[in-house]
Image (cartoon, rainbow, N blue to C red):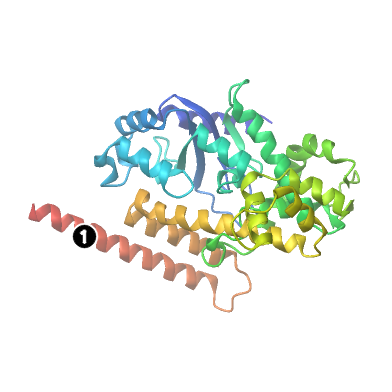
């Protein structure tokens, strides 16, 4: 308990290095929570939710100008805010940042409006997906903030979606794996760059955290699903899979998946009545597959555009370093490979070091010429 308090205190101390007008802040990922087969948790991932992105970036550029890649820092806070709000998943990341205590962090900045929209509508299923999983909250949203309501609604949407994707009988760990995987299914980085067992590695060590997060939510679904009280991960749960129940879940889904479901069913622009389409989908034996395709479409688009945006916001050298670290971690986690992991990891490290060294030498040459 004391260790946990000390850890939270250290995390909150990092926030002293940033502008104060943060409405909501949380840490996530392997740097904040233990994951299986991941013993190299050097980087901490943070999300800052701000009300006025222009003002926040203006203040942060004064405090931490080196956090921003060139030439963005010279283009000014208005340009940076424009990149944040209009490219990708409305998130601006600064990565591989060293704090005064020596902690390496990656932090994303988003507006409270963009956060609420994604939590309620799943426009990108990006930050909403991160908040389907346990996170370490460092700054609580205001008691009367719309963020609080949207956070709860996002968890309800995750439960309904998971139930629609699961069969009549399933295990509790299957349930949480489906929820954790909603924002990874369709993510192009899962093809190459992320450990294929990432969802399993997230859920298994954090199962108790998942249970605590969703316990208040699942109380509202007792008429639809039975979760036997047991400490065993393999205990069998049973849900009502009647079309009437599926219609209920489908009608409560976020707006963007609903729109995509209707378009997929009517094979074109949204012209048919939403309720009629969802009712028909609920009676379709391939209801699960149709929904899964729609979710993958959302995640694919946001993951691609946000990753391309990351190359611009991080800069070329940091992008190479960050991507190299991701690939190295993926190779280290792959125990089935026939080539020794050390040799693959060393090759990745050497490749990254070579590229970074060449870029640095080129910059030094340019400075001497000037």
Q: Left or right of 27: which side holds 248?
A: right
Q: Quadrant of residue 177?
A: bottom right
Q: Left or right of 181: which side holds 324?
A: left
Residue reaching furthest to the left: 369
Could you say which is closer to the camera, residue 177 or residue 123? 123
Residue 147, given in percent of the width and then of the height, sits at 60, 30
Is residue 256 visible in the rendered image? The answer is yes
Could you say which is closer to the camera, residue 351 or residue 314? 314
108 versus 327 height, above or below: above
Q: Residues within 10 Å of mark 1 (few under 14, many from 20)?
A: few
Is residue 175 visible in the rendered image? The answer is no
Q: Quadrant of residue 357?
A: bottom left
Could you say which is closer to the camera, residue 287 or residue 271? 271
- Label 1's element? helix
Residue 215, given in percent of the width and then of the height, sits at 79, 37
Residue 349, given in percent of the width and then of the height, sits at 41, 64
Residue 67, given in percent of the width and then of the height, sits at 34, 41
**Residue occupying image coordinates x 55% and y 59%:** 300
Residue reaching furthest to the bottom: 338
Count of numbered circles in the view: 1
Q: Left or right of 293: which side holds 31?
A: left
The quadrant of the rendering that contains the N terminus is: top right
**Residue occupying image coordinates x 61% and y 59%:** 296
**Residue occupying image coordinates x 91% and y 46%:** 228
Dot 1 corresponds to which residue? Answer: 361
Could you say which is closer to the camera, residue 102 or residue 191? 191
Q: Quadrant of residue 285?
A: bottom right
């Amino acid at each position: 308990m004391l260790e946990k308090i000390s850890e939270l205190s250290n995390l909150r101390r990092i926030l002293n290095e940033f502008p104060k007008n943060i409405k909501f802040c949380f840490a996530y990922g392997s740097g904040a929570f233990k994951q299986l087969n991941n013993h190299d948790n050097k980087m901490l991932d943070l999300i800052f939710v701000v009300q006025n992105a222009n003002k926040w970036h203006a203040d942060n550029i004064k405090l931490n100008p080196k956090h921003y890649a060139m030439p963005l820092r010279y283009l000014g806070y208005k340009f940076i805010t424009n990149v944040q709000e209009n490219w990708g998943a409305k998130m601006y990341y600064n990565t591989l940042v060293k704090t005064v205590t020596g902690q390496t962090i990656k932090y994303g900045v988003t507006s409270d409006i963009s956060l609420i929209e994604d939590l309620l509508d799943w426009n990108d299923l990006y930050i909403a997906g991160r908040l389907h999983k346990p996170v370490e909250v460092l700054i609580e949203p205001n008691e009367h903030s719309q963020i609080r309501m949207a956070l709860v609604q996002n968890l309800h949407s995750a439960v309904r979606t998971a139930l629609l994707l699961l069969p009549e009988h399933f295990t509790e760990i299957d349930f949480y794996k489906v929820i954790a995987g909603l924002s990874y299914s369709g993510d192009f980085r899962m093809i190459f760059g992320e450990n294929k067992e990432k969802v399993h590695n997230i859920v298994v060590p954090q199962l108790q955290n998942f249970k605590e997060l969703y316990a208040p939510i699942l109380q509202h679904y007792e008429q639809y699903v039975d979760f036997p009280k047991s400490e065993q991960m393999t205990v069998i749960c049973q849900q009502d899979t009647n079309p009437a129940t599926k219609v209920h879940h489908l009608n409560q889904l976020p707006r963007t998946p609903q729109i995509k479901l209707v378009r997929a069913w009517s094979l074109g622009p949204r012209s048919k009545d939403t309720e009629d389409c969802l009712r028909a989908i609920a009676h379709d034996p391939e209801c699960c597959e149709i929904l899964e395709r729609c979710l993958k479409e959302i995640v694919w688009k946001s993951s691609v555009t946000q990753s391309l945006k990351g190359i611009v916001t991080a800069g070329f050298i940091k992008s190479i370093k960050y991507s190299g670290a991701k690939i190295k971690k993926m190779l280290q986690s792959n125990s089935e490979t026939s080539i020794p992991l050390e040799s693959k990891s060393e090759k990745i490290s050497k490749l990254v070091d070579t590229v970074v060294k060449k870029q640095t030498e080129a910059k030094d040459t340019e400075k001497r010429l000037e």
